[in-house]
Image (tube, rainbow, N blue to C red):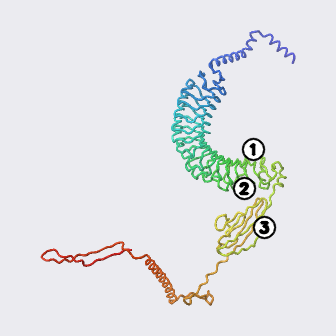
Amino acid sequence: MQSSERKAIHTEARQSPMQADHHYTPRWGALCMLAAGLALTSQALPSCPRACRCGAAESAADCSYARLVAVPERLPPELTRLNLSNNAIRTLAAEQFGALTRLEDLDLSDNLLAYVDGDAFVGLRSLLDLRVARNRLKVLPVGAFAGLPKLRLLDVSGNEILGFLDFTFRELANLRVLKALQNAVVFVSPQAFAGLTDLRQLHLDGCNLTSVPTEAFVHLGGLTGLSLHRLESAVLPNYSLLGLARLKELIIANWPRLETLSVNSLVGLNLTSLVIRSCNLTSVPYAALHHLVYLVHLDLSYNPIGYIQGNRLEDLLRLEEFHIVGGRLRLIEMGAFYGLLHLSLLNVSRNLLSTLEERVFQSPTALQRLGLDENPLDCDCRLLWIARRRSSLDFGRGPPTCGAVVRWDFLDYAATEIVELLTCRPPRIRPHQRDLVWVEQGHTAVLHCNAEGQPPPSVTWRNPELRALTDLGRIRAVGNGSLEVRYAQPQDGGLYRCVASNAAGNDTRSVEVRVRALSKSKPFRFKSWLVALPSSPPDQQEPSFDVKTLMIAASIGFLSFLSSVSVCFVAMFFWSKGKGQIKHTANIAYVPRTAATSSNGGAGNYVETSRFTMKLM
């Protein structure tokens, strides 16, 4: 080995100087090219402003945090990116960036901009992204974004914009994303979004809007994502988003008064993702969701939803993710997720759940991620299925815990120990009353069913036809496990069954109800003009009414009526006498044709033949 190394060294030493120079030529060539590139680059940006940091290789200028009060002059025309954020720039003059024809990214965020000239951005024909977030703009003048034919992103969030006027964005035919969050928008004109034919994402904050600007959305036929934040509306009205047929993602967030979604509020949409967060929904809007058969992601977090009903989400065939975090969820009924064969993620963290049973799923094996932490879970056998699947489930932020006083992680125990720790006691119905209950017709019978077990069993009642009874109707199950038969009728009689069930089994008890019908009414017999009780049993007699009795009754009634009328007339007579002499109020005289006697055609004497006089009191 040493002889070979010596030979190699000796051979290298014998090489001529020309050969040695040829051996090192590639290294020196690379260094020369790098030096030439740096020289050319430094010549490409000869006039970088003193307050800015220019990256020549990337044609970028970073002027952020430079305490600028105006846009720097003599910016290099070769710039493709310019960062002017976090300064004190107050206004933008006309054609402020007219020389930057190659600029693609302009950031004016976090300044003091209160006014933008209508021609401020003229000349930026290559601009793709424009950020004017967190300034003091109150109005976007019409035409302010003229001259930006290639603009794809516009961010005006965090300003004080009061409204969007008609045709404000008319020149932005290629705009894809418009962000207008955290403003004080009071109105949106019907033609505000006219011209945005290629818009895909709209993020709108309308903290002072009282309704969805439906007329303005008509112009956004290509929209695929819509975020509506902080609207002061108590309901999402019917057909609010009609016309947005391509919409796939809808976010409704921070509507403090939103309590419900109208049945047809989402008609016309084919959503794949729906988020309704931090609102005031007290129940899952089943009716508004049932037609969203393409929905994959559903998030109803931070709403005061109390329970999820069974078999109400079965129309959402493609649903894969369901989130209800930070709510008031106390119960998920059996079969709540029946029909959701592809449900792989369920997140119900930070709620009030006492358990989550396996029977709420139609396909529990499809579940891959489960968020169940920060719930007051009971330590019983209903959690065994989670313990058995702990190796295949992703619990996200943390594993679930159980225990009333001291919370403990039941997933840390071995399989044999968990079976002994998470136990249930089958239900047992305590004997409380007779197995036969009598009730008078028209009265109310109460059937009691007191059951005990671990976990506390649920009690249901079934009528003689074995149909389950609800808390509605004349015969109803009440909250304490009892059954009320109100205004009992003969047909209500029969055998009623009380069924107590929990995860460990069930128990049944039957109670027979018999209704005592009312007896027939006892007739009276009229023997004379006086009514008398019959001497013989009433069920052996028939009431008899003769003509004499009817005549006597009619005479008594007529005499009573006549005497009452007479008394009234006598009283009126004496009352009128006490008023004094009757005075005339009107005189009407009637004079018929007169009989005249004349001689030789002369005038005769008129003789009055009769007179009528009417006196009115």
- The reply to whether residue 54 is in sight is no
Separation of disc 3 and disc 1 at Cα?
Answer: 43 Å
Does residue 442 sit above or below 176 in this rendering? below
Q: Mark 2 points at which residue?
A: 359
Query: Callout 2 environment at 10 Å: few (<14), some (14 to 19), or many (20+)?
Result: some
Q: Which residue lies furthest to the right in this view?
A: 2
Q: In this view, does 27 lie to the left or right of 83?
A: right
Disc 2 element: helix
Q: Name the residue under label 3.
A: 430
The location of residue 282, given as percent across then percent down, is 65, 53
Q: Residue furthest front?
A: 580
Q: What residue type is labelled 2?
A: Arg
Disc 1 element: loop
Q: Residue at x 63, y 21 (%)?
A: 49
Disc number for residue 372: none
Q: What residue type is labelled 3?
A: Arg
> Are the residues tagged 2 and 1 within 8 Å (C-beta)?
no
> Are the residues tagged 2 and 3 within 8 Å (C-beta)?
no
Q: Which residue lies furthest to the left in this view?
A: 600
Q: Nearer the viewer, mark 2 or mark 3?
A: 3
Front in this rendered view, residue 515 or 6: 515
Q: What residue type is labelled 1?
A: Arg
Separation of disc 2 and disc 1 at Cα?
Answer: 24 Å
Separation of disc 2 and disc 3 at Cα?
Answer: 27 Å
Query: Callout 3 environment at 10 Å: few (<14), some (14 to 19), or many (20+)?
Result: few
Query: Callout 1 environment at 10 Å: few (<14), some (14 to 19), or many (20+)?
Result: few
